[in-house]
Amino acid sequence: MKKILFIALAAFMAVPTFAVNDEEKEEKSNKPVFTVVKELPITSIKNQNRSGTCWAYSTLSFFESEILKKTGKTYDLAEMFICNHDYMERAELTVRMHGDSQFAQGGSAGDVLLTIKNHGICPEDAMAKPGTMIGDTLANFNEFFSVMEPYVDAVAKSKSKTISNQWKAGLQGIIDAYIGKVPEKFTYEGKEYTPKTFAASLGLDWNDYVSITSYTHHPFYTSFAVEVQDNWRWDHSYNVPMDEMMRIIDNALDKGYTIAWGGDVSDDGFTRQGLGILYDLKAGGESLTGSDQAKWLQLKPAERKSLAEELGVNAPEAKPSQEQRQEDFDNWTLTDDHGMHIYGLAKDQNGREYYLVKNSWGQTGEYKGVWYMTKAFIAARTMGFLINKNAIPTDIRKKLGI
């Protein structure tokens, strides 16, 4: 009798344990389980902190990977060197335009490339650490730009018939005081350099880099300046169809090249935890069963967003198209938000493909500073990207004439 009672009690106690495990399994099935397909070398994760300098961090990260590929050497290049030169040149244009050009923290990958071509570059140790000039431990542009913006605006909108060049000396003093003065000479690994000779020593041909985009308001296989405010230099990008844009990214990774990506991260599917999924919040999808899809279509947008988060990797994903890209660009829902660094490819447990993307927000999120962004998300939300022209498939290069 005791033996029978013991067996029954053991069976009773086991039931809730199995139930909890089943619930855990169901929850885990909605969370991505990634298998890395391709991962190219990158340098350490950085933190732009309270500064709108993702464009500098992502592009220098890209160039650091280019140097790794070419020479095997690891460098930490100075973002604030780029910012120091770039903000002065942006202020000069704003003044020339009498204020009809935006003076702001943002920029583009082209800014970094042109600054290196014109002024060179230096290692991180040759400049003040970001933020240290104002007593912070990381970059903090809040006070910096609250001082600089009205200064530039006052000069650009001056009612004087003529202005002197002294405003430049004053502005340079502000820039140097907040983010550090650029060095004329410095010593690196026992050798003296100027910024230009250091750039020349890195082993890269700075003429190898081109920008790629995909829009229909300009002819394909031509170049044009993408009409966004942070492209204030009117740097040109080569225009290709969306499917070829994506083929360039895949070919680059396959050949061992990374990509300096710029695009829109304002979508609900871009999370602070490290995911970028092009959730279909307008309709159901093939991944939903009939009953799920009926429920999905009846939900309000906020409710669909909540359900998408609950479904995780099982949520329906929209299919990007060339037409939708153009519509989103024209109606301001595809905006120039953020710069990041694509360096690999992975798959989740459902076979969906994601790019491995290095961010510049420190080691945050589920994946310690790395984002997994689906191919659909990148196809739909790309503004443009900088790439080594040797990474472009031969047939596309021929069409572009490069």
Image (cartoon, rainbow, N blue to C red):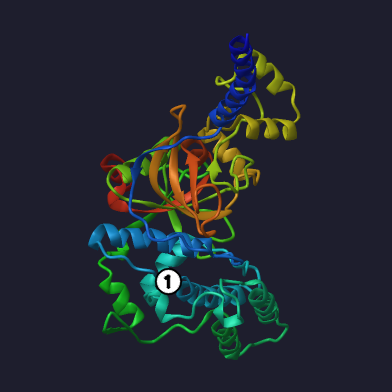
**Residue highlighted by disc 1:** 115
Image coords of residue 338 (percent x, y): 55, 55
Question: As shown in the figure, which amino acid type bears the numbered disc 1?
Answer: Thr
Image coords of residue 20 (percent x, y): 62, 26
Name the side, left or right, on which 101 lies relative to 391.
right
Quarter of the image where the N terminus is located: top right
What residue sits 57% from the left and 87% below the top? 173
- Describe the element under mark 1 as helix, strand or loop: helix
In this view, 191 is above or below 317 = below
Residue at the front extreme, as displayed: 1
In this view, 211 is above or below 285 = below
What residue sits 54% from the left and 28% below the top? 29
Name the side, left or right, on which 49 lies relative to 66.
right
Instruction: Choose between 63 and 124: the one closer to the eye.
Output: 124
Instruction: Choose between 191 and 52: the one closer to the eye.
Output: 191
Name the side, left or right, on which 88 lies relative to 202.
right
Quarter of the image for residue 153 reads bottom right
Image coords of residue 399 (percent x, y): 32, 43
Q: Residues within 10 Å of mark 1 (few under 14, many from 20)?
A: some
In this view, 183 is above or below 237 = below
Residue 18 can be seen, yes or no: yes
Residue 399 can be seen, yes or no: no
Image coords of residue 93 (percent x, y): 56, 73
